[in-house]
Image: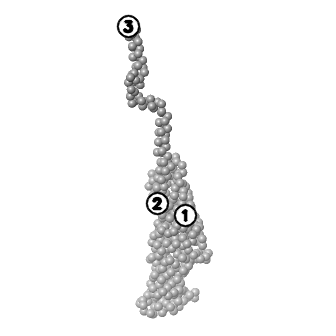
Amino acid sequence: MADDKYTSQAERFSNLSREGSDATPTGQKPSFGQKAKRHCAKWWWVHVLVWIAIILIVVLPIIYVGIPNIAQQQLNDSTLTVEAQAVTNPQPNSVELAINSTAHSKSSFHPTIEGFEGSLYLKDQPEKPFGILHIPETSVQSAVPINITQTLEITDMDAFIAYNKLIVTSETYSYGIKGKTVIHQQGLDGINVDYDKTVTQKGLNGFKGFELQDYNITIMPESDGTTLRGTAYIPNPSVSTLQLGNAVFNLTCEDQYIGQAFINDLVLRPGDNYYPTNAKTNQTLVVSILMNGKHGDFQLPINIIGDSITNSDGIKIDYLSEAMRASTISISLNASVAFNN
């Protein structure tokens, strides 16, 4: 009988050992760890759903808010530099435009920007687009060329006249390019962004530095009325080539109109430009000004103001004519050469 009793107790201890540490001796409360294990075994699916919700709450704003904001900011931080520009074949409502430019970016990402239409407008003025640029698809790098050649249709004449006046009169001028496009980064859906870039360029600075060189003045007009011939030196400090056409200028002296000067087939290229010019003036009035003794040494102060521009087809181009009228060039001629001839 004793052997049976010991055998029964051994089996009991063996069973307890096999049940493991989760077993709770009769009369003892389960430990925190045991409660946690039982809870997780029963409610594991709830914990999984909670973790999925947390991940979605964190990740989705990054994908749909954070990444688009980063893309927009990096596009805003990029810059655009124009290295060369040509405006040719002026017509009453259009010009031919060629731009060589470089976009600079410090982004560590290299997405592709879809081609889009960018509105050209003047900064610091009521936003009235005067033309639309067709900007090609671009891959973002630290420096990437963006070259455009197109016919630019004038969409707002008043704004385009104001733009051309800035080119003629300003040392530097700024304009904006604005549009909407889509950025594509590998592994992500397209991101809609706004493109709004300011471009600053050098202008003609009111033709500062203009000179009339190697000129000859005659008292008696030639058969066509010409009284002056010379070479016009016109500096162009900008990167723009500007085809103007046939230019007519009004000449005044002591606030009196004395005649007109002419330059044909005028194209202003970057750097120094030399063009033959001739003038037809009222020599009777010119001589009377010289004789009034106000200027001495036969000096003749002349103001040159643009009058009109016509293209190679003989069509008057109003936006160029208006721009040329916005600047006055002042020179002084030594009229004694007229009396030495």
Q: Amino acid at mark 2?
A: Thr
Dot 1 falls on a residue whose secondary structure is strand
* Residue 66 drawn at (x, y percent): 47, 50
**Residue occupied by mark 2:** 79
Return the residue nearer the eye: 24 or 122.
24
Mark 3–mark 1 contact, CB under 8 Å? no
Residue 332 at least partly seen: yes
Name the disc covering residue 2, or none: 3
As shown in the figure, which amino acid type bears the numbered disc 3? Ala
What residue is shown with label 1?
119
Q: Residue at x 50, y 88 (%)?
A: 256
Extreme-front residue of the structure = 27
Mark 2 crowd level (few <14, some 14–19, many ≥20, 10 Å Cα): some
- Which residue occupies the extreme top position in the image? 1
Instruction: Give the x, y percent position of residue 53.
Output: 49, 41
Q: CA distance from mark 3 to mark 2?
A: 98 Å
**Residue shown at 47% from the left, 71% from the top:** 203
Q: Which corner quadrant of the image does residue 157 belong to?
A: bottom right
Residue 240: tell me if it is visible: no
Give the mark nearer the N terminus: 3 vs 2.
3
Q: Nearer the viewer, residue 335 or 74?
A: 74
